[in-house]
Image: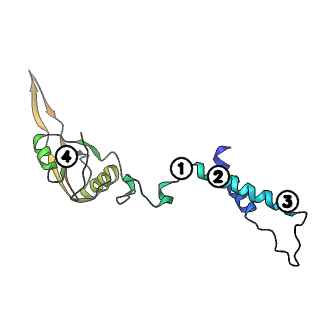
Amino acid sequence: MALLDFLKRKKEIEKARVKPPVRLGGEKKAPNSEKNTEKVSDVKKVEKRKSVHPVKSSEAGVLPKAKQFNKVKDFSFEIVKEPHISEKASILSEINQYVFKVSPRSNKQEVKKSVEGIYGVNVLSVNMIKIPPKKRRLGKTEGFRKRYQKAIITIKKGQKIEIL
């Protein structure tokens, strides 16, 4: 089973790292010393296998782009529906403010968590705007356009959200 191979390797390494007891009196080689040398060579093979695999970025000390910012837990992808693209929104994006359509039942804290989690940026403030349903007519039939809620997100200077 490939899932449990790492346990086997761990046991092999532990067994191989057990050093033979130090013999006093100048004895050259004991009959069991050949086995000990085989174990050392096994360790080298296991270490070679490990070196072939790429080193995880967290082990190397360099974090990937997504992990450079605060890692947010417990956020929902359903809160932020889509970016609201308009002329005003494009002007606001120049001053680090982005506009999103969000769920009408969400609050500022939920929107902040989900934007930080999805886009990996630091949110400074969230402003919410409720757009009411508007009356629309098509011939004789009258109806309403759906209501929705917008959130204007201000992010930290120097960070960007790539929407388009």
User: Quick one: label 1, few (<14), some, or many (20+) residues within 10 Å?
Assistant: few
Q: Position of residue 72 (x, y in %)?
A: 37, 58
Q: Position of residue 128 (x, y in %)?
A: 18, 53
Q: Amino acid at mark 4?
A: Gln
Q: Which of pointers 1 and 3 lies earlier in the amino acid sequence?
A: 3
For label 3, the residue is 34
In this picture, residue 31 sits left or right of residue 76: right
Is the residue under label 4 in contact with that under label 3 (CB below 8 Å)?
A: no
Q: Which of pointers 2 and 1 lies earlier in the amino acid sequence?
A: 2
Residue 54 is tagged as 1
For label 4, the residue is 149
How far is mark 3 from mark 4, CA to CA?
75 Å
User: Quick one: label 3, few (<14), some, or many (20+) residues within 10 Å?
Assistant: few
Q: Secondary structure at mark 3?
A: helix
Is the residue under label 1 in contact with that under label 2 (CB below 8 Å)?
A: no
Is the residue under label 4 in contact with that under label 1 (CB below 8 Å)?
A: no
Toward the viewer: 132 or 95?
Answer: 95
Look at discs 3 and 4 and give the one toward the viewer.
3
Look at discs 4 and 2 and give the one toward the viewer.
2
Q: Which of pointers 3 and 4 lies earlier in the amino acid sequence?
A: 3
Vertical relation: 62 (above or below) 25: above
Q: For residue 69, what is the image quadrant? A: bottom left
Q: Amino acid at mark 2?
A: Lys
Is the residue under label 3 in contact with that under label 1 (CB below 8 Å)?
A: no
Residue situated furthest right in the rendering: 31
In this picture, residue 56 sits left or right of residue 29: left
Residue plotted at (87% across, 76% down): 26
Q: Which of pointers 4 and 2 lies earlier in the amino acid sequence?
A: 2
Toward the viewer: 44 or 27?
Answer: 27
Q: For residue 70, what is the image quadrant? A: bottom left
